[in-house]
Amino acid sequence: MMRSTAAVFLAMVVVATPLLASSQPMPAPPAPPTNNSRLEKAYVALQALKRAITEDPKNLTHNWCGPDVCSYYGVYCATALDDPCARTVASVDLNHGDLAGTLPEELGLLTNLAVFHLNSNRFCGTLPDSLRSLHLLHEIDVSNNQLSGSFPSQLLCLPNVQYVDIRFNNFCGEVPAAVFEKKIDALFINNNHFEFTLSESFSKSTASVIVLANLPRLGGCLPSSIGDMAGTLNELILLNSGISSCIPPEIGKLDKLTVLDLSFNNITGTLPDSIGNMKALEQLNIAHNRLSGEIPESICALPHLKNFTYSNNFFCGEPHRCLEVPHIDDRQNCIAGRPDQRPGEQCIEFLHQPPVHCDAHGCFAPPSPPPPVYAPPPPVY
């Protein structure tokens, strides 16, 4: 009930917001009633934010004066869900403002907020712990700032949040496994300094979009349970994430996936033929890994595949069907007769390396010890 209620509230915000872009002149908004405690709290919160802003080169907050918060630039009001006679602040959108400063704890007073967008600014410090009070929050986007500290675990307390974007900041440390168990629709945590291992909890996510790119300290393996995400997952981007793994054949169960990027990792072994079952796949990037063998023809026959990049691996063959994909990149492999391939000695050296085996979890398995050599007992004299 809470999630559907928040969605209705968000829809009201989305409908109200485009009115600002209309060419028709808008009438002056009525002054807020003096007995509206929601707007009074919003006034306290927004004035605290204004005081915490140290640089405002575009003068976005120039009209943040007086109690009529619904007229503030970037602030949008809507009818409160629990009181049709009351208005409340439903959205704050200061994207691309180049604002500098910190985020005050008073933001937790915006308890009816559904949308909080502050991307492409220069806010620093941590996200205020009081954000856990924003139980109607549906979207939070604080990407491309200078925020720091550990993963903002207060986001896990928000029952209705569906869109979480904290990429391009300076967050660090562990990412709690609970973030993948939370029912959200989109998760962007790339380009931070997190250190954690991809575990089985990853495959419990119900998100449609997951971006964990450029997290070289992530590490871990692609779990075989990745196929459990088939019901919801549309885009998975794990480029440059320190993954050392094979690609489990269960990945072929992701029949709704349109984008898969596993490039710039330490993925080895062969490319599973089961990827040919991913009928919705449009973009596949596995470049800059240690994959080998032949490209399965079933992958190049995918009906919607537009871009297939498998350069800088050690593939030794590709079916002619692959050359019919609109955009392919097969450079720097070991494919005879194709231009711009690796030197022969590199390919030979690679082929003479011991084969890599992965365990049931997709991780590299240590080589089996050689069988013991029977030695006869020494003679007795």
Image (tube, rainbow, N blue to C red):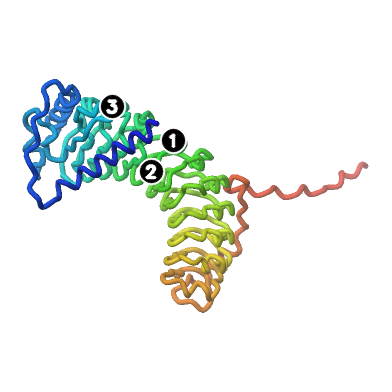
Relative placement, left or right, of 200 versus 95 is right
Whole-percent x, y for residue 102 in the image: 19, 33
Q: What's the residue type where badge 1 is placed?
A: Lys
How many other residues sit within 10 Å of disc 2, few (<14), some (14-19) or many (≥20)? many
Q: CA distance from mark 1 to mark 2?
A: 10 Å
Whole-percent x, y for residue 124 in the image: 22, 36
Q: Residue at x 56, y 53 (%)?
A: 253
**Residue 287 shows in this picture:** no
Instruction: Give the numbered dot on residue 82.
Output: 3
Mark closer to the chain start, 3 or 2: 3
Relative placement, left or right, of 333 versus 90 is right
Q: Which residue is mark 1?
A: 182
Q: Most extreme residue toward the bottom, as rendered?
A: 337
Q: What's the residue type where badge 2 is placed?
A: Leu
Q: Secondary structure at mark 2?
A: strand
Relative placement, left or right, of 119 versus 160 is left
Where, quadrant-wise, is the C terminus in this rendering?
top right
Instruction: Give the numbered dot on residue 99.
Output: none
Q: CA distance from mark 3 to mark 2?
A: 29 Å
Q: Residue at x 51, y 38 (%)?
A: 201
Mark closer to the chain start, 3 or 1: 3
Q: Which residue is mark 2?
A: 187
